[in-house]
Amino acid sequence: MTTSQPGDVIVATDSAEAANLAAEILGRAVHEAVQERGVARLALSGGNTPAPAYRVLAGLDLAWDKVRWFWVDERVGALDSDRNNARAALEALGEVTERGVVHRMRGDADDPAAAAADYEALLRAEFGVAGAVAFDALVLGIGDDGHTASLFPGTGAAHIEDRLVASIPAQPDKKLEARITLTAPVLREARLALVMAVGPGKRKPVADARAGGDIDAVPARLLGEQRNRLVWVIDRAAAG
Ligand code: 6PG
């Protein structure tokens, strides 16, 4: 894998080990955040890859009452839709989230742009207006097209810098519903950005992302601008 991107790459034997390794790293981040600041703020991605890691994470002995749950992105639609990222994550995590605080993006809002602005206001209130919005950990994935969060290639979304949260129009030709997503300024500031990718379909996007180049073509390349810790947890199939 030719890389120009910083960050650790952990290659697991298979997807199950990737889930265990990711959960262990996230658990450590939660523990450290609570020890140092009395609270842990996580922002989760949807998709298929992270759910097994969420299930393992939920089995750890952590100060769940000190955890605040946020989302990296959300699909616009009913909150109980099987496409909804928060529904899937909350189902995988189970009752530990009930001991903390859950802040879902309102994908069911009639006006996604207003819902994005509301989520940004929530983040500003949570992190302080002037301060950087620095999550203790982000769980990110990478699409086969090289997107991360809901920052899709060829849309310019990876270059949005004037907002913390953006609404992304639907892309009917790609069968993609409208989205609400954190933007690069937030992804960049996280204390830990943990990117999960498993399976042979991720081999090319992971290699493209870590090779550097035009960010709008492969938005996951923006992870190369990470200010703090970047960890890729991939399996052998995705490592190539
Ligand atoms: C989403 C996710 C998205 C995801 C990638 C990878 O809403 O789809 O947040 O960014 O991480 O699409 O998805 P898989 O893990 O299903 O491959």
Image: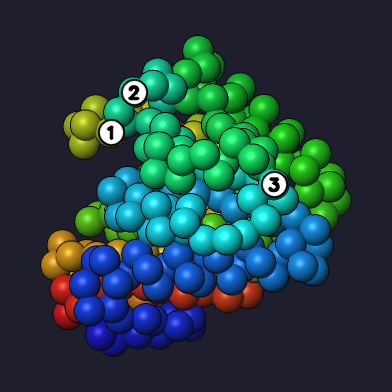
Numbered label attached to residue 222: none
Q: Earlier in the sequence, mark 1 or mark 2?
A: 2
Q: Which residue is mark 3?
A: 65
Q: How many numbered marks does the figure carry?
A: 3
Give the alpha-carbon distance from disc 1 to disc 2, as whole Å: 14 Å
Q: Which residue is mark 1?
A: 176
Q: Amino acid at mark 2?
A: Ser
Q: Position of residue 135 (x, y in %)?
A: 65, 57
Q: Position of residue 217 (x, y in %)?
A: 33, 59
**Camera-nearest residue between 154 and 181:** 181
Cβ–Cβ below 8 Å for labels 3 and 2? Answer: no
Is 226 above or below relative to 182? below
Discs 3/1, front: 3
Q: Amino acid at mark 3?
A: Asp
Q: Position of residue 125 (x, y in %)?
A: 80, 39
Q: Amino acid at mark 1?
A: Leu
Residue drawn at (40%, 73%) of the image = 21
Residue drawn at (69%, 47%) of the image = 65
Mark 3, ligand 1, within 8 Å: the answer is no
